[in-house]
Amino acid sequence: MVVGFNNLAVSLSLGAMGQRRQMFKILTAFGITEFTVPLIGAYLGKNISTLIVEYSQWVGPALLILLGIYTFFSVRGNHRDQLKLADKLTSWKGLFFLAIGLSFDNLIVGFSFGIVGITPLTLALTIALFSVSFATIGLVVGEKLKKEFSELSVRVTGILLVILGLLSWVGWI
């Protein structure tokens, strides 16, 4: 998956759910995770990489698809339930679990680039910067879409998350 697109997609959803007010927490959780995970990947041994590849191919896409389905149908629920879920997703615990699930592929990126000699710190900083940048864009655009188009923006965001998850699952991105 292209670095940061998972975070862009999820942040669009969070922005559409009105969670831009949690921007600091979201960007911090994504930034720390996206910085740390490639470092871990860079130091993993070749024996473990096969196991990681198996999980990375479905964990991130599955999270995107599930969040997309939920986002699409969330407009039918009452507003209080939507806010409760959004608050759970943007708690520190929720954000770190979400970010870790979305960054499994960065373990492989870290492992691969570690082999070719790119310094792990440079790799981790680059991935973290792209991820935080895309997450910022997603939160701002998601919030604007919600204000402009309300229900339609939430449904479109849900559909985009599912499409992104499916494309990632089949290896097209």
Image: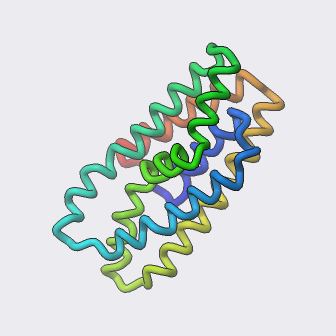
> Residue drawn at (39%, 57%), measured in percent from left and top?
105
| Placement of the N terminus among the 4 image quadrants | bottom left
**Nearer-the-camera pick, 91 or 67:** 91
Q: In x, y percent, where is residue 63?
A: 44, 39
> Residue drawn at (63%, 21%), measured in percent from left and top?
81
**Nearer-the-camera pick, 53 or 170:** 53
- The colour scheme applied to this rendered structure is rainbow
Instruction: Say if 131 sits above or below 70 in the image.
Output: below
Instruction: Say if 44 sits above or below 27 in the image.
Output: below
> Residue drawn at (52%, 43%), measured in percent from left and top?
94
Instruction: Say if 115 sits above or below 97 in the image.
Output: below
> Residue drawn at (28%, 72%), measured in percent from left and top?
44
Q: In x, y percent, where is residue 150?
A: 76, 25
Relative horizontal placement of residue 95, taking residue 62 as reference (left or right): right
Q: In x, y percent, where is residue 140?
A: 76, 47
Relative horizontal placement of residue 3, taking residue 112 as reference (left or right): right
Asked which quadrant contains residue 73, the reply is: top right
Q: In x, y percent, where is residue 17?
A: 68, 33
Relative horizontal placement of residue 42, taking residue 33 as reference (left or right): left
Asked which quadrant contains residue 129, the reply is: bottom right
